[in-house]
Image (cartoon, rainbow, N blue to C red):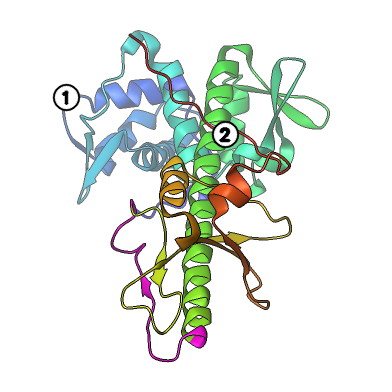
Amino acid sequence: MSIKIHEHKKYLLVKEIENLYYIIYDKSYTKSQLDKFSINSYKGVSATRNTLELMLFLELLIKDKDVFVRNKIFEINKKEFQGEFIKILFKKVCIDTNIIQYNEFYCTDGTWFLRKSGIPIKYFALRNLLIAEKVINLSSESYEINKDYQNLIESIVKNKQKKLTLANLKQQLEFQEKLGEQAEIFVMDYEKKLLSCKFPERVSPIDVSAGYDIRSYLTDESSEFDKFIEVKCFSENVEFYWSKNEIEVAKELKENYFLYLVDNKFDTPPCIVRNPYFQVYLNKKIKREVQNYKFFLE
């Protein structure tokens, strides 16, 4: 649906929008039929037509050719029309379309405000509607949100922040996964250079529970895999996460288990720790930090 609400000049007031909505509630009308609705309105036909497009934009109405019908997804209680209409409006302009950016809202002493830059000038008809309905009140440099809508704005801002946080987390995890893959490939190449007739094997893509990422050979004379490598990629500080399963496998494999610590610049050889269960896990001098606990409630 391509409705350019920034081209609109005026909207009807919410009470008039409610009347228009309930005119269409159980019957479809053409645009020319609905023009009659505004004959007695000082705002005129253009305001009604702009409002109809706003209601299409908000998906309160559906248009089939030249006929307007109610979108039955919405069942608005007539006694609460104004509050419900404003909720739908803010959801559309703040969450679905980002016409108003969530970070343009700010809270001071428990009161929410919207910066004047938060509503672009091209949407002045929308701004004027919000002012006329006392949803926002003009202050010196910002619009103060009416007390009846404070909770609505707070929930919108927190919802957007949560979504952004989850999106950032997902992006970070994807980045870390990519770095991990690059580090494993880097170690594979490193191992190949140590061996002349044997070839290491990446295990992580096929068995995440193995407790190591690569299996290789201690020497070319080894008849079977006898070197098991867990790859850890680090940035500035040499720190890494070591799972309980990996620690248990390291404990079992002893001298055949290796930690390869790889700088994410991939410009230096890996730092190799053999038998890390003894060298790292049992080493009281190495700082460690517990990140998670598992609890069993009986």
Which amino acid, by three-letter code, is at mark 1? Asp
Residue 99 tag number? none
The CA distance from mark 2 to mark 1 is: 58 Å
Could you say where residue 295 lies in the image, as x and y percent from the top left?
A: 42, 19
Instruction: Kindly check if marks 2 and 1 are in contact, taking CB atoms under 8 A apart as contact.
Output: no
- Magenta stretch encompasses residue 198: yes
Which amino acid, by three-letter code, is at mark 2? Gln
Mark 2 falls on what kind of element?
loop
Residue at position x 16%, y 29% in the image? 27
- Between 132 and 277, the one nearer to me in the picture: 277
Q: Is residue 42 above or below residue 192?
A: above
In the rendered structure, the answer to whether residue 14 lies left or right of residue 130 reads: left
Mark 1 falls on what kind of element?
loop
Residue 291 tag number? 2
Could you say where residue 165 lies in the image, as x and y percent from the top left?
A: 55, 40
Could you say where residue 141 lies in the image, as x and y percent from the top left?
A: 81, 32
- Magenta stretch encompasses residue 184: no
Q: Nearer the viewer, mark 2 or mark 1?
A: 2
Provide the residue span drawn in magenta: 193-209
Residue at position x 53%, y 24% in the image? 155
Residue at position x 27%, y 42% in the image? 32
> Where does label 1 land, which residue?
26
On the image, which quarter does residue 164 sit in?
Answer: top right
Could you say where residue 228 lies in the image, as x and y percent from the top left?
A: 43, 64
